[in-house]
Amino acid sequence: MSLRILHVLDHSIPLQSGYTFRTLSILREQRKLGWDTFHLTSPKQVGAQALEEEVDGWHFYRTPEVSVSKVPGLGEIALMRQLECRLQQVAEQVRPDILHAHSPVLNVLPALRVGRRMGIPVVYEVRAFWEDAAVDHGDTTEGSLRYRLTHWVETWALRRARHVFTICEGLRSDIVARGIPTAKVTVIPNAVDLEAFEPGGQPVAALKARLGLQGASVIGFIGSFYAYEGLDLLLEALPGILARRPDVRVLLVGGGPEEAAIKAQALRLGLADKVVFTGRVPHHQVQLYYDLVDVLTYPRHSMRLTELVTPLKPLEAMAQGRVLVASDVGGHKELIRHGETGMLFKAGSSDALAQAVLDLLAARERWPAMREAGRRFVEEQRNWTASVANYHSAYTHLLPS
């Protein structure tokens, strides 16, 4: 069955994030199913210069940026009005069968209004809840008036969407607990493109030398530096690791809001010569940096966001046959089998993180079995072809027979 789906997105490539990588994977697989996909981004697409843009062979409709008021709520209203106007234009042009709005809720509210006017069913894909993202960004606190109001808006939208998709069981359980019928919620799990990830290669000697990592056992993190990622905990754990393994170095690849704070912490702890910051690297070069790492670390702090949401990075690591250590937040426990596909440690405990890393470094004979188990897990359960196939039933039930 040929379908025309208009995806309403927060942002897209050329910006790089877990959000944009998931989007591209979904679009590729939907195209393989013979569906026509169209793509509109919100006013939050930084750097968009035109109303339409081609990026890496993908056509995106853009929404002009809007001046954001500093008065709470007014900026969000202006953003939604701008998106609604643009969405109406694009929907009239491409005539989709389905409007597929992705997180945050600011995208689905305009879609619901346009869908009602044009008689197009609207589905909502929850990648994270807006209220929890606001807590992480420091814009509010859990339980505040703003938090509770945002929670109410999110629930209101969930009830009015014709179907709800989400990325993991943690979020599905939360959605159902809000009174959304179980049959109305479908999990489209985070996954990997197996063709894009092969088991890791050997480190490039010149790059290793340039970064001062010769002869070192390398603990690494590759991704965006957000507070919830727990890089501060990794640095807290490092002195305890160095006391027993002075050859260890930490490689941090990427950047983000916490970059300055993490660099300042390394200086304060006297670890500046033990931690290597590369800054952001081009996406096509990331594999070279993965090849430098012995043990990947995902020390996420425990909060609603990390307890409910499964990340992409550990799956990508397993697809490459990497050895990894991760905190035991809910999002990680849904992906990682302790002692089999990776090692879990008590979230928030630098001592537990240090011990997990030391134990893994001391048991290299276990690494081949872990690598194989991780790769097998993504091959059998977390590939995008299998994941995206779950859209089919929900989509077809929304359309006239």
Image: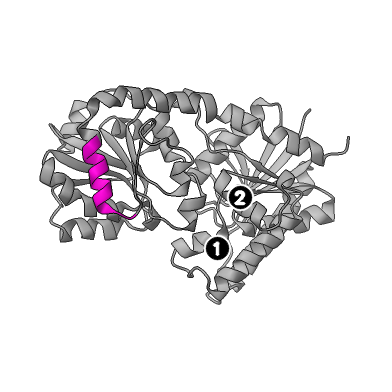
Residue projecting furthest to the bottom: 71
Residue beneath disc 2: 173
Q: At 68% from the left edge and 55% from the top edge, which residue is drawn? A: 108
Residue beneath disc 1: 131
Q: Residue 53: x and y, percent? A: 59, 43
> Which region is colored magenta?
348-359
User: Which tag, 1 or 2, sits closer to the chain's start?
Assistant: 1
**Label 2: few (<14), some or many (≥20) within 10 Å?**
some
Image check: 168 left or right of 398?
A: left
Q: At 30% from the left edge and 52% from the top edge, which residue is drawn? A: 231
Q: Is residue 391 above or below residue 115?
A: above
Q: Find out whether residue 356 is within the magenta segment.
A: yes
Closer mark to the observer between disc 1 and disc 2: 2
Predominant SS of the magenta segment: helix
Task: Tell me which amino acid carries mark 2.
Answer: Ser
Q: How is the image coloured?
A: one colour
- Element assignment for label 1: helix
